[in-house]
Image (spheres, grey):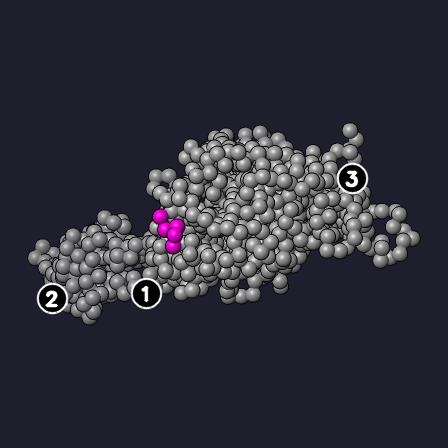
Amino acid sequence: MTEQNVLLGEKIPTLDRFADLDSVFAECRSEAFLELHERQKFRHISALLLKCIEKEAMPCFLLAAVLEFIDRVNREKILEEEYTLTLFEFWLNHFSGLGTDEIQVIRGKIVGRYVPRDEYQAFFPVGMGKRFAGSHFVAAHLSPDVDTTVSSFWGWMDAFGCSVAKGTHQWSLPSGLTDGHIQLFFKRMFGERVFDQVSRAEPTMTLTALDLLRSKDFAIVDRLTPVENITTDRAIIVVDDEGMFCGEWSSQDAEAVQHIMSAFSHCLRWFEGQCQSRLIRVLANDQTTAQDVSESYNSVLDTIIEQCASAREIPDQTLVLMHEYLIKIIGVENGSEQTFRELLLQLDRKFGSGFSLFLAKCQHLCSEELFDQKGHLKADRVQATRILEQVVLAMEEALDVVRKNIERIDHLLAIKEKVLDWPSVFVTLKSDVDEMKSKLGHRDHLCVISPEKNGRWFPIGIVLADDLRETVLGTVSFRDFSNPEETKMASYIDIISIVDHHKMKLQTTTPPAMLVGDVQSSNTLLAESSLKMNMCYGMRPQIKFLEGLESSIAEQIQKAFVTEPLAPDHGYFVDTKREIVEYFFYLYGILDDTDLLTKISRRDVLVVKQLLDRMRSLLAQKPVETVSFADLPNDQHFVKRAAKKLLQNQDLHSIYARVYHFREEEMEKSLLAALKNEPSTVFSDTKEQNGCCRIGQTKLFKTNITTFDTHRQRFIKLWYEKIMQINTARPHIDFFLHMISTVPGEKEVFSGEEALWEHKDEFWIWIPNTGLAEQHLVSFLNAFQRSPSAQALDIDLIITGPDAEGREQLCKQNFPNAHSIRIEHDHKKEPTLLIMRFKAGAMNSRKSQVSPYLPKFVS
């Protein structure tokens, strides 16, 4: 089979991987690497990954290669904690040393698209260089289906490539993995652990210190640094000689500690002054004896600290703190109740200050060198002055040693923590906003640390109090939904971007970027915008037959088919493999949400054609039209005929055939798993709407009908047990509806023949016995009976359960157009349910055929 005859479904590209990773990881087994601290290993690994990315020439699409590198780091347990793409992005932002423009290129290489950042205004409000604070989430709705999974993944790719926020960019897939066939495709393209490595499975969106960290607005100082060399105009982090965290210092700390140090310094100056003055006076007297000299300095040494004149001038509260300081920091047993002599001896023991020399010099003043045997002064004034000078010099040198030690930042930190009882407070990268706010107190920042071995910590950065006090700390983009109740996010996260095809009700603090349209899949909207961008910066045509054509026609062809790289001097690119993979995903999303194009709009049809044409042109490297609509009248039947023509196209068939074979098998397995009370996706496609409704849908293929019909009552019971748990936990959810819908399989669609099914589809409806719930049921019945779908069908209403008679009268009053209304007496022991039965395949669209008529909660 020639290259041109190979179908698109068989041309799924294999994404590139980094070459010779063995030699890269050999470095991680060296002795030098193994001796590094954990944070040094993390930075080294991240630098190796960056080096691998930088080596690759543009254009390229390196996401799969990056994820393979990350997976190998984790499999070989090179780091103690799991390494993720989020952590690499965090390192890239803060510690790579690259500038903003250089980082943008790295992002472009990873996502396979490097374009002017303003181009991303198609998806995000990032004009004029705007970057949002904190981190950015791109979110799928709860119980994600294929449409929201695909659209949110490529939304995350766009956000990552654009650098929407200053922090990291995270893909929120709240309930974890989605349908099996899309799982397999994700894993085939990006590796078995792609969901673990890229998606965030937590049901809530909250921020941590990692998202708010600042790595530049602080200073790191050595613990031996004199305080006079430190300015407190910004945050100070104190470290030891290995760079490990000792504490943090601020202007508030400096002011509080200064009161204690000033009090202590005043007392030392009093001692210094009294010693000097008393010795000078006593030696100036001709009648001075050795005993007089001894008494002059001993009287000062034996003075109790708190009784000296300077201490009596200190405020009582400060004096108490100085007393604690002398005990806890200096080590004087009785604190300020001790004498200066004991203080000097302890200062000697603690700092090696040299006061013992001073005391020896004092004793030398009473020696025989100055006094005779009777104790009278015998030396002349010059000799006495010289010896006195030595005493004073010894005291000054000892005091100088003390002052240098007590003015070091580590000494002041000890006072802060042990005397003032202000321990250095820090958080880790995993600390959430609530924890940070609870620890903040009066502080203007919090230090962020990374735990190391042996209970030590390495400082990474800070979180500013001003940042934590902001109303908005992070941002989110919604894909395939727009109502905040369809996800769980913290109040400090703001919505800035929406791509959706449902009705909406929301309020934002700033104008969001919105792609909203009357289409059947969110991926239709994404595909339209991505096609425009990719055609501008992807492959360019060099088509000789354009010469001589009318300029308008040539321009149209030029825009439609792109086959040659953009001129190198622009520097921008969209990698061809990225394009093809992206379009496969879009097609899967569109085909799934439109049930193989059976519910579709004009825009959906046209974008599917554009995707197929573009993919085939990229592979053939020349303009190719896979499907032509030229022979179709542009009338009210155009969309249906165009969809049929697309579905019978060999290229599109090669894409959806395997998927739908797989889906039929997966649904059968899921039905059987549910019957065994094993994990199942039978009831997973469920949404909460309008504040009080929970509406789900199970899509069955013809091959699944036998299993479902055989165990129908068992499935109803399983559904009822699930909704009772929801209603018990959240009583405001009081209207439950589940759709059992039949969708055509691959063979039925490709044949083009109308499906003739003998069975019927169903709606199951349950409400609790409350007045408000009954109002909600009445509201739905009245609204739904007037819908085009209900008016076009013969709908049978079947009521089961002990309250069936009461519900029968309610249905007759509010759904009078029903084909029949009857009670099933055989199921009186079953829950009270309202079951609608109608032609199979007639109502498959939850969005357009049911959701507009759901009741609303009015507070």
x 11%, y 56%: residue = 372
Looking at the image, the residue that sits furthest to the bottom is: 313
Q: Name the residue under label 3.
A: 620
Residue 591 pos. (x, y %): 63, 44
Q: Residue 619: name its quadrant.
A: top right
Q: Name the residue under label 1.
A: 255
Judged left or right of residue 573, residue 159 is left
Q: How crowded is mark 1: few (under 14 residues within 10 Å), some or many (20 or more)?
A: few
Residue 654: say if magenta. Answer: no
**Disc 1 or 3, which lies upstream in sequence?**
1
Q: Quadrant of the C terminus?
A: bottom left
Residue 287 got which mark?
A: 2
Q: In which quarter of the image is the N terminus?
A: top right
Q: Give the range drawn in magenta.
A: 802-806
Residue 699 got which mark?
A: none
- For the residues labelled 1 and 3, the Cα–Cα distance comes to 74 Å
Residue 853 pos. (x, y %): 52, 58
Secondary structure at badge 2 equals: loop
